[in-house]
Amino acid sequence: MTHLIETRELCFSYDDEENESTENKLEGKYALCGVNITIDKGEFVAVVGRNGSGKSTFAKLLNLVLEASSGEVYIDGKKVSPEMTDEELLDLRRRVGMVFQNPDNQLVATIVEEDVAFGPENLGIPSAEIRERVDAALELVGMTEYARHEPHRLSGGQKQRVAIAGIIAMMPECMIFDESTAMLDPSGRAEVVDVMEKLVREKGITVINITHLMSEAARADRIIVINEGKVIGEGTPKEIFTNTELVRRAGLELPQCAALLGELRARGVRIDGAGITPDECADIIIKKLQNREEE
Amino acid sequence: MKNISLGQYYPTGSVIHRLDGRVKIILAVIHIIATFLCESLASFACLFVGTLVLVLMTRIPLGVVLRSVRAIVYILIITFILNAFFTVGEGEPLFSVWIFTLYIEGIWNAAFMALRILSLILGTSIFISYTTTPIQLTDSIESLLSPLKKLKLPVHDFAMMMSIALRFIPTISDETDRIMTAQKARGADFTTGSLIKRAKALIPVLVPLFVSAFRRADELATAMECRCYHGGEGRTKMTVPHLCARDIAAVGLMLAFGAALVLLNRVDFLYKMV
């Protein structure tokens, strides 16, 4: 079976010419270097890393916003390259949708539903079908009542949900969220992550959430940790969260309760399993305390 | 600044609001031409009454409509005075002081000119500013200009630019506010000093504003590409405007109105413009 997304030895450098010599290669001037990742259909993957780790670069290589310096990207077994024809490129961008960080800078139209229609209109979908898609997309993100509103009057979370609807209306197979929650307040962030989860669980759309917030990454099925342009770890949230050393090396911060468990473990308390939500952690600690009483 | 509205659109759901945007542009053009064809008192009176009826049909409060007139009050007064004194009549002047000589024809001409300007402003307000949303307006302009695409004119791109500009006016005005506040917090003074000093004080606002506008443009372009934007070719529209009976009726009535005005020019009552 082919993977939905597969990268082989993917490298990218922002200043092409200077990097011709091998010296620079060693100095790590690459924003991304030797990345091998596979992502399957219907997966919910979080890509985490600190600022400048190359995680956003990785996302932009997937739908050819940036061109890889070397290495290959395959989407559904098809190679992504600048030599693609215009139709192939449009098809690629339709299949791999992308939601950006600043909600203001990705809304095009002055009315919410017009904006959602922008993508399908570009694809040349018949009018009646666009209408259906727009209504369905707005309903999915819970913005139906705002269909006739002006985007600039909405809150950050609402704007971002409109942006998501705009991508959903193109019927993508995969959606990449490039730090889409970074500019939002906690409630807006929760709204957006809820929508991501809905997309994966109900629509079967593959979601890649690029973030530096571990609490958000915890909701994914799988976490990929990137640091200095390289993948330094990969696993389920529980696996990653118990690996305190890896998280520290990536320059990230564990959610407080996971950090507490890690600290206890470091002090010599034997803790089995990993907790991500406060409830899970509390359960683990209570169980541990009960065991001790019995001993 | 959150409440800045795009244009002056005033929704009331009247018949004129519901007309097709393209038809409204055509109506506005006919109205402008009709205004310039008026010559006699009878046709001016008819134009005035007709325009008033249209204003009432939009169901927009008169106070709101008058607001757009208020902006041109000075232009009206100056035109009136200039026309009044620079028209040379045939009969005896009403009075003559120094270089100012006033003829009866001058007063008529001045009144007609003022009425014309008033009717121009009201006409475009009724058909365009108050009753057409900006997006409807840009769509209509694109649609009306589409024959020019054959001449390889970038009509679609032009319409796209207009609608993006409209979309970003409130966003950028918010940003201006934010930058001004930030500069004030650093001790900038925008309100005192000479005109030149105040203009200079705006430079630290404009520079960051431009930088951020360009950054926005860059991000927006990427986002648009990611949403498969590739120019106007092969693009469809969610809402395809189609003309209904009332649109055709409206154009017919407006043409009849214009024709009536021209015919009324023949009625020689009191005064006719030369």
Image (cartoon, coloured by chain):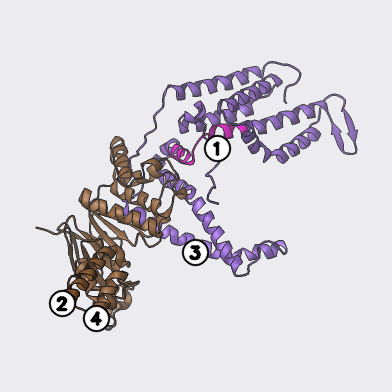
Chain colours: A brown, B purple
Please name the predominant secondary structure of the magenta segment in the image.
helix
Q: Position of residue A84 (x, y in %)?
A: 22, 57
Q: Is residue A86 visible?
A: no
Q: Is residue B37 visible?
A: yes
Q: Is residue A203 above or below residue B202?
A: above
Q: Name the residue that disc number 1 marks.
A: B129
Which is more N-terminal, label 4 or label 2? Answer: 4
- Name the image quarter holding the C terminus of chain B: top right
- Local crowd size for mark 4, using a 10 Å CA cut-off: few (<14), some (14–19), many (≥20): few
Query: Would you say residue B136 sits in the magenta stretch?
Result: yes
Q: Residue at 44%, 59% (x, y): give it.
A: B216
Amino acid type at image mark 4: Ala
Q: Name the residue that disc number 2 marks.
A: A295
Amino acid type at image mark 1: Ser
Q: Position of residue B271 (x, y in %)?
A: 75, 21
Give the total of numbered labels. 4
Q: CA distance from mark 4 to mark 1?
A: 69 Å
Q: CA distance from mark 3 to mark 2?
A: 67 Å
Question: Range of the magenta residues?
Answer: B122-142
Disc 1 to disc 2: CB gap under 8 Å? no
Residue at the front extreme of this rendering: A294
* Discs 2 and 4 lie in a common subunit: yes
The chain ID associated with circle 2 is: A
Q: Quadrant of residue A249?
A: bottom left
- Local crowd size for mark 2, using a 10 Å CA cut-off: few (<14), some (14–19), many (≥20): few
Tag 3's secondary structure?
helix
Q: Position of residue A245 (x, y in %)?
A: 25, 79
